[in-house]
Image: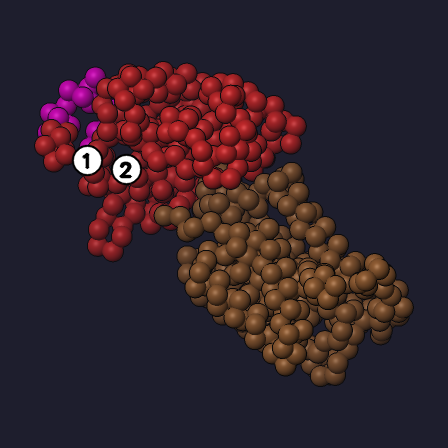
């Protein structure tokens, strides 16, 4: 029964990992750039919720919703005002811009909140469990997993059944042609960055509910997000889910077998994927 | 409809479009000919704003659009169909037209749907409405290219060597389509190598060489012009 227990826990951790990868995958798929500030967007979003809940005394649900909306606005604004200026054929300036943003956000968080561990208190939910005969699973990890899956489905639906989603897919296919049809791709980029920032913030918030974070937690989340999207397949939404679940499973299994291994086996999984299936689990072979 | 004055563009020491002035009225079709490197495509790039011009003015329907961005010029009413049709691989034919109508013509979603269905019908694409752009055959992609351009509700349509890759009979079909496009509130400019296609569909033909306008007159005068014949025979032996 240990096997079932490990698999369930791996999948549930994988749901959180997948959520970290989702926003990054969206950015990469549409704008063809890597957002180095993705981890800081996640941690910054969590600190927004912590600030609202602890310092302003807002109820938890309100703090979370407020943080998500504010994260969207910040992502949207940063793309519109800053990153769009350096978007072009060369991805390096945008990469450096987001690298700069990540440093600024991290230092801002240290300045405002100090370097201590912080978490979002979810009360008795944190320890509640469901007994399933031989195994028991935590209620909160299960909620987290369901939310992650629901968000993947919601994003998929948005991309295929709304006007904004259609515009985003068109921009992903060919940003130059979008301009020739009279659409400002800068606005599409801003919307995508906003959505990505909100998704990252939600992942960060769930991390802060599950354990604790510091202003320096972003880099490690960025690494996980990168591993998720490379393992799953670059730019593929459902690939990120697969990648996240695979990475979560490997982490939990490895920690059970070799408790001192840390993230080592996750990195080895990445290496194996790069060697054996560089297009990722769900990726197609590179075209052209 | 379109009034171009003194349009020029140089890349370094090379003048690619040299002081070109031309007027196209609504309902009129202007053919543009010239050897490779004559500046025909750059001329279109200047009209659409893809390349900024060094000098000159572009007026569309009485409005100076010389300083507008590519996107704003589409909204102002310039549409371009390319020799190699471009489409979004993952969007269906219907989504292409709906996007072009909402983004380029700035009409409401319901009006865009009406326009989309009308154009699907007019361009013979109804049966393929739910096919993704990446899965179309060449002739259907050309049709989509046309439909996309029309969906932005243009005042000026630029046709960029659209007969490329088509058979002789398909070129005839294309000529018929272009003739059918001629309505009083639409101006057409067609760049093409096939002289008879232009003669059959255009009111006037402009000949460019080394970025300069050599002649602009009715098709019969232009095709009889000795200078034009020399340029085109030269091109024929090159090719």
Q: Position of residue A227 (x, y in %)?
A: 55, 65
Q: Which residue is mark 1?
A: B35
For residue A193, side relative to residue A34 (left or right): right
Please, what secondary structure does the residue beneath circle 2 have? helix
Residue drawn where x is 65% and y is 55% of the image: A195
Q: Most prominent secondary structure in the magenta stretch?
A: helix
For residue A132, side relative to residue B71 (left or right): right
Which one is in front, A185 or A230? A230
Which one is in front, B129 or A238? A238
Q: Residues within 10 Å of mark 2 (few under 14, many from 20)?
A: many
Q: Position of residue A50 (x, y in %)?
A: 79, 71
- Tell me, yes or no, whether the highlighted magenta stretch contains residue B227: yes
Q: Residues within 10 Å of mark 1 (few under 14, many from 20)?
A: many
Output the chain of dot 2. Answer: B
Give the residues in magenta. Answer: B214-231
Name above or below for residue A65 compared with residue A163: below
Residue drawn where x is 75% and y is 81% of the image: A117
Q: What hue represents chain B?
A: red
Q: Position of residue A37 (x, y in %)?
A: 59, 68
For residue B42, side relative to residue A284 (left or right): left
Name above or below for residue B200 compared with residue A85: above
Output the chain of dot 1. Answer: B
- Tell me, yes or no, whether the highlighted magenta stretch contains residue B100: no
Q: What hue represents chain A?
A: brown
């Amino acid at each position: 029964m240990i096997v079932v227990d490990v698999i369930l826990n791996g999948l549930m951790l994988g749901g959180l990992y997948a959520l970290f990868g989702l926003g990054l995958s969206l950015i990469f798929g549409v704008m063809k750039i890597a957002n180095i500030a993705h981890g800081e967007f996640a941690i910054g979003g969590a600190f927004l919720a912590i600030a609202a809940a602890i310092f302003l005394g807002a109820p938890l649900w309100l703090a979370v919703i407020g943080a998500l909306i504010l994260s969207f606005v910040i992502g949207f604004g940063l793309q519109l005002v800053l990153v769009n200026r350096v978007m072009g054929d060369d991805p390096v300036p945008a990469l450096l811009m987001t690298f700069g943003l990540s440093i600024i956000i991290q230092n801002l968080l240290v300045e405002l909140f100090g370097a201590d561990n912080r978490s979002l208190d979810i009360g008795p939910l944190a320890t509640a469990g469901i007994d399933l005969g031989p195994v028991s699973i935590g209620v909160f990890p299960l909620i987290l997993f369901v939310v992650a899956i629901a968000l993947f489905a919601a994003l998929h639906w948005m991309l295929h059944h709304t006007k904004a989603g259609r515009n985003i897919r068109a921009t992903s296919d060919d940003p130059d042609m979008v301009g020739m049809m009279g659409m400002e791709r800068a606005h599409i980029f801003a919307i995508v960055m906003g959505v990505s920032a909100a998704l990252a913030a939600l992942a960060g918030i769930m991390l802060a509910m599950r354990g604790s974070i510091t202003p320096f937690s972003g880099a490690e989340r960025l690494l996980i997000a990168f591993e998720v999207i490379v393992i799953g397949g670059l730019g593929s939404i459902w690939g990120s889910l697969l990648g996240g679940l695979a990475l979560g499973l490997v982490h939990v299994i490895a920690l059970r077998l070799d408790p001192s291994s840390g993230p080592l086996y996750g990195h080895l999984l990445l290496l194996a994927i790069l060697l054996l299936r560089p297009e990722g689990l769900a990726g197609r072979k590179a075209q052209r | 409809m379109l009034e171009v004055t003194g349009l020029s563009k140089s890349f370094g020491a090379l003048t690619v479009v040299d002081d070109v002035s031309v007027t196209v009225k609504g309902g009129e079709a202007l053919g543009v000919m010239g050897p490779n490197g004559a500046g025909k495509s750059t001329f279109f790039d200047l009209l659409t704003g893809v390349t900024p011009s060094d000098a000159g003015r572009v007026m569309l329907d009485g409005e100076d659009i010389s300083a507008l961005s590519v996107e704003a010029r589409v909204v102002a009413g310039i549409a371009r169909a390319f020799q190699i049709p471009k489409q979004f691989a993952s969007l269906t034919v219907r989504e292409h037209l709906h996007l072009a109508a909402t983004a380029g013509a700035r009409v409401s979603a319901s009006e865009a749907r009406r326009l989309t269905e009308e154009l699907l019908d007019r361009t013979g694409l109804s049966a393929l409405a739910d096919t993704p752009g990446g899965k179309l055959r060449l002739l259907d992609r050309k049709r989509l290219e046309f439909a996309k351009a029309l969906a932005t509700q243009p005042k000026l349509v630029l046709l960029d060597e659209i007969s490329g890759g088509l058979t002789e009979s398909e070129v005839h079909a294309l000529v018929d389509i272009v003739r059918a496009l001629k309505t009083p509130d639409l101006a057409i400019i067609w760049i093409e190598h096939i002289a008879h296609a232009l003669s059959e569909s255009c009111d006037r033909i402009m000949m460019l060489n080394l970025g300069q306008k050599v002649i602009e007159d009715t098709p019969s005068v232009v095709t009889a012009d000795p200078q034009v014949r020399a340029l085109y025979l030269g091109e024929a032996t090159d090719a």
